[in-house]
Image (cartoon, rainbow, N blue to C red):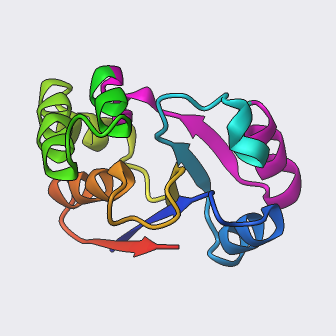
Amino acid sequence: MINVYTIGFTQKTAKQFFSILNDNNIDVVVDVRLNNSSQLAGFSKYPDIEFFLDKICHIRYKHDLNFAPNGSTLTRYKKKQINWEEYEAEFAQTMQGRKITEYIKSAYNDNISICLLCSEPTPEKCHRRLIADYFKDAFNEVRIIHL
């Protein structure tokens, strides 16, 4: 059984965020954001997040743009030009084009505890939830845990 965790940083203090990760024995945080260096990201802005994860929790950090949405899709969704269902459909096309299931099998086949990081406070309308489902497609037994 592989555990795939997901977490959003908004509406969490740094103390809450790093405590949650530490308490769940995460080995590596996989940042799935298209832009990980925005000033609005606070403690989760790169390169600060990599430093904090290492020094506070001894967790590795990986920014994996293979999981990021297409820039135009994200922009149109944020501007409310497309709804969530349209975003999901376009995201699925992007992932299909990137052969994401095969990529996951080759890049994430070691038995480590990973946590997918994005900004949304809950997973319902966040692409990290969609990515977690691709892990289910790639491996036989996957448990998804949203932190």
At 61% from the left and 64% from the top, the residue drawn is: 26
* Magenta span contains residue 4: no
Q: Residue furthest front?
A: 80
Q: Position of residue 141 (x, y in %)?
A: 23, 71
- Residue interval drawn in magenta: 47-71
What percent of the width, then of the height, locates residue 71?
36, 22
List x then y, in percent, for residue 16.
75, 72
**Residue 86 seen from this side:** yes
The vertical placement of 58 against 83, above or below, is below
* Point 33% across, 66% down: residue: 124
- Residue 4 in picture, x, y percent from top left: 41, 64
Q: Residue furthest bottom?
A: 23
Q: Is residue 61 magenta?
A: yes
Q: Name the residue nearer the viewer: 3 or 68.
A: 68
Tell me which corner region of the image, top left, top right, bottom left or bottom right, holds residue 100.
top left
Q: How many marks?
A: 0
Residue ID at (26%, 43%): 105
In the displayed structure, would residue 142 be above or below residue 131?
A: below
Drawn side of residue 91 relative to residue 76, left or right: left
Where 59 sits versus 11, above or below? Answer: above
147 with respect to 52 (left or right): left
Q: Is residue 95 left or right of residue 67?
A: left
The answer to whether residue 113 shows anywhere in this view is: no
Q: Quadrant of the N terminus?
A: bottom left
In the image, is residue 3 above or below residue 94?
A: below
